[in-house]
Image (cartoon, rainbow, N blue to C red):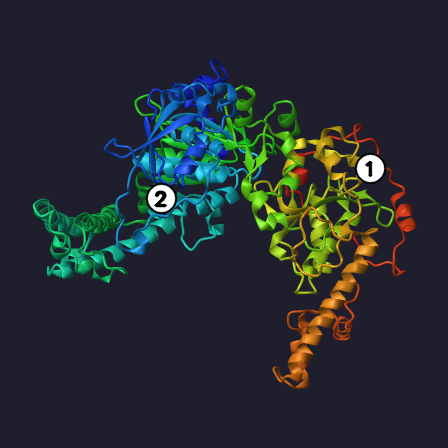
Amino acid sequence: SSDLSIRDLMNETCIVPDWLHNIFLGYGNPSAAQWTNMPDLLETVDFKDTFLDADHLKESFPEYQISFVNPDGSESLHPQSPFRIRLPKTLKTNAQALPGNKSNLPTDSDANTVQERLVVETYVPPDPGPYPQDKPKQNTVRFTPTQIGAIISGVQPGLTMVVGPPGTGKTDTAVQILNVLYHNCPSQRTLIITHSNQALNDLFEKIMERDVPARYLLRLGQGEQELATDLDFSRQGRVNAMLVRRLELLSEVERLARSLQLPEDVGYTCETAGYFWLLHVYSRWEQFLAACADNKDKPTFVRDRFPFKEFFSNAPQPIFTGESFDKDMRAAKGCFRHLKTMFQELEECRAFELLKSTVDRSNYLMTKQAKIVAMTCTHAALKRKDFLQLGFKYDNLLMEESAQILEIETFIPMLLQRQEDGYARLKRCILIGDHHQLPPVVKNMAFQKYSHMDQSLFTRFVRLGIPYIELNAQGRARPSIAKLYNWRYRELGDLPYVKQEAIFQRANAGFSYDYQLLDVPDYHGRGETAPSPWFYQNEGEAEYIVSVYMYMRLLGYPANKISILTTYNGQKLLIRDVISRRCAPYDFIGPPSKVTTVDKFQGQQNDFILLSLVRTRFVGHLRDVRRLIVAMSRARLGLYVFCRRSLFEQCYELQPTFQRLLQRPDRLALNLSENMPFTDRHVEDTGPIYLVSGLEEMGNIVNAKMHQVYQARMSQQYNQFYRGQIDTSTNGILQQSQQGFASVDDMDTETERSELQNGDVGEALPVSNSEETTDTEVKNDQNGDVKPENCMEGDKEESNAQADGDLAPVPTNMEE
């Protein structure tokens, strides 16, 4: 179907807008499509809740002299958000003057120069209404100057490109652009395109936290079911919501009619409700306003004469005080705004009365009502023909993850609408991505290597020298972990939040370090294995990584805060097998949040990441620095990398990261004195270090911990028994003793059941015969038969399918 879309495009005359034409083909001035070169830029922008307060605005424009004025032009002495900004001449003619651009910041030599004046109008927003649901949702993110620059550029017409390194708030910036666009250009429709359903759902969940009515949001495609919300944003879900809302509003109209002592049949349909609004509601409001104009000197006049007082008698707070005419008048206008919104919504529901079929209703919703329509690039390619037939129109295109989207998949969403009289309607194109992370997947090696099809449009534009805004402050990871990947970016710093918050200050309980590289020698004489071509596995790393996961769970780390990543599909399946054998029998351990490949986990994050690099002979496709950057940037609080040190420390491309990793011991450093998931120890304080010699010793540590957990739980059950708090029958004691540890019915054999009841946790992990593994044994183990070769030589070309999860599972021989 997407092939048909491409063929259709070849046979059509529709083109990209004139302002994007030369840029797209790679001709002319690289900055020609920037907003400063566009004819119809917005002179004044209402930023709504973008700025949290006046200080936030001043921090965002340090190079300007800020003048706060009231709507009447007088100076504002106590300015408060929201703000309208009249863009100064410098900003309108030079995109380099955007906030956050380091070259603009005033220096000591500029001290004598006069700063340009920035006029900021502060205004009091109208009273939204007396009910809690009338209050608009507010932004709480304190945007950095660079993010403010991206928002200003995104709201203006033309091409905006935002490079967002990991954790720099790409999604928050995109959502605020949508929010400001909706309020400044309410008649325009914006199309959101992402590469994955996960990114689309993240965007949608954040848009719902902004002041954009849910009835104007529409989510197309199948991934909508995964949205973490009670609301359904699919076409059918929105239609059903409109029909339910229609009935709610009509019942409110009937209540309003009763409060005015009028016949109750006015709420029969949206049409009759519309006539009721004109004849009875609006006319009463006009009479009330006329009467108020002559009685402004009477403080109780509004309270006494407001015509809809009875309707609003169920408001949670008294509406009128009777102390001030102006204050009561503002409240009265808020009440009228509530009524106006109610009847406006009913007018929007009217089409759903006239259109009877579900298909017609959902098509009307998409082409007429929705202001923000979101879909994946795959859905856009599959359904392009349907969009054209329905006459779908949009003014703005916002594309997230655009560095992961093929050039043709970026091109198709630009042309989901027909031209109007030879004029392309598209006014804004906002591309947000990171070309330093993984590119689009092209499985055909010839297309990938020789046609360069794995280059996204976003990356091509960056290489052509088209100006972009690079977000420069990350708020995801500890500063120490961020140093593993921030060398790849121009000026990637840290937000104050990650330096000041207690969670980033505290160490990871049970571990001496917040990140470590762990050298994993051959296990049973084997390093990497490949049961079938490109299907790489490493049993030693799989067992070690699962034992560390079990150690974390036994300390009390939540399973949903730990993800296990690997660079190969075969290893992913092997780790899942090991988890099902080692962890499944014990319900107090359970599986981690995710076991997946680095490629699939791009765009996601977790507090703790355990990473297996698998290879022991050649570096393989981790030589692509973009894959390394993704792997290193997924963790917030803890990152533990399991690999063959002698191989990866030689790889030239990966030196900046591995040199930093190897400044710490390559054996797992534990703090065995900590037995809880939380500690007050500072992240830079290692405490007493215990270096684990290898996998066998880690197995002993985990088994000892499991025995302690079992004994503690048994002790708790017996204490409850002696206090008479549990069932005193034999069956009752046995049943209670197993709760929260492992269900007896889940045990595979009678032997396992008896072992559990006798306090023996069995062979949870491979353990050595001796109680302690000596250093000599580990050294012998490291001198295995398979010696890593120089990683600069002989790497074979590998398909992207290795990490895609598309290969069929291969049976793994994990038992010796």
Q: Residue furthest front?
A: 112
Indicate whether 204 appears above or below 268: above
The residue carrying mark 2 is 212
> Is residue 56 found left or right of 312 in the rendered image?
right
Q: Residues within 10 Å of mark 2 (few under 14, many from 20)?
A: some
Q: Which is more toward the observer, 280 or 362?
A: 280
Task: Label 1, secondary structure: give it.
Answer: helix
Q: Is residue 689 shown above or below 76? A: below
From this viewpoint, is residue 17 visible? no
Callout 1 amino acid: Ser
Q: Residue at x 34, y 27 (%)?
A: 425
**Foreground pick, 41 / 193:** 41
Image x and y of residue 184, in percent:
32, 34
What is the number of the mark on residue 238? none
Query: Which residue appears at 69% of the width and 65% of the height?
Result: 586
Determine which of the numbered discs, if any, sits on residue 646 in the image: 1
Q: Earlier in the sequence, mark 2 or mark 1?
A: 2
